[in-house]
Image (cartoon, helix red, strand yellow):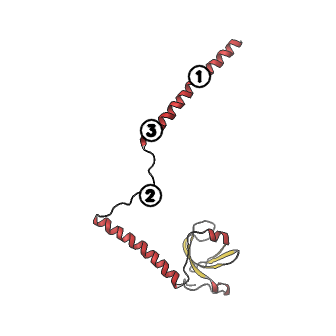
Amino acid sequence: MSVYEPPKAKKWQKAERWKVGLWDNRYPLCGLRLLWVLIGTKHVQMSAPICLTKMRMSRKEWNKLKDKARMHTEEDLAIDKERRDKVWNQAQAQRIAIENGTYVKPKRKYKKKQDSDDTTKQWQKLYIEVEETQDERPKKIQSALDKLASLR
């Protein structure tokens, strides 16, 4: 079976090509695969073109998959090619900028963690609180022992 033709059985004649990321050990194939897919009401049936592996998953699991793209028509292939070219061109421009020495690192999109001064102050407060509670414990124990001794 070639990548460009669905399996020969009659049921697979309406199958569509999809690029699917299977990142779970429950399935016989793993990784980003080009599969022939039949989407039904309850189940989705998939067939790998090269290794002749067929599998099935529920429609709910199929809808939860985030890493999937339809690759059946020429329009789908053109959209995927544009996306790959865009990523490649950005990476190429970054490589050239690094070689020329003009690359500027992008700003952070997230906040920095608290300064180390703030964390040391917090640790000092905790240490003082722990010391205070440890000082109180022996006094309570000693007073309890004194009471026991007076009862004898």
C-alpha separation, residue under disc 1 versus residue under disc 2 = 51 Å
Tag 3: Cα neighbours inside 10 Å, few (<14), some, or many (≥20)? few
Viewer-side residue, 126 vs 36: 126
x 42%, y 40%: residue: 117
Task: Name the N-terminal-most of marks 1 and 2.
Answer: 2
The residue tagged 2 is 109
Q: Position of residue 111 (x, y in %)?
A: 45, 52
Query: In this view of the protein, which residue sits in the foreground, 93 or 148?
Result: 93
Q: Quadrant of residue 59?
A: bottom right
Q: Residue furthest left?
A: 100
Q: Residue at x 67, y 69 (%)?
A: 60
Of tags 3 and 1, which is closer to the observer? 3
Name the residue type under label 1.
Pro
Mark 3–mark 2 CB contact (< 8 Å): no
Look at mark 3 in the image and give the residue it sits on. 120
Measured Cα–Cα span from mark 3 to mark 2? 26 Å
Q: Disc 1 designates what residue?
A: 138
Q: Give whichever of discs 3 and 2 has the lower sequence position.
A: 2
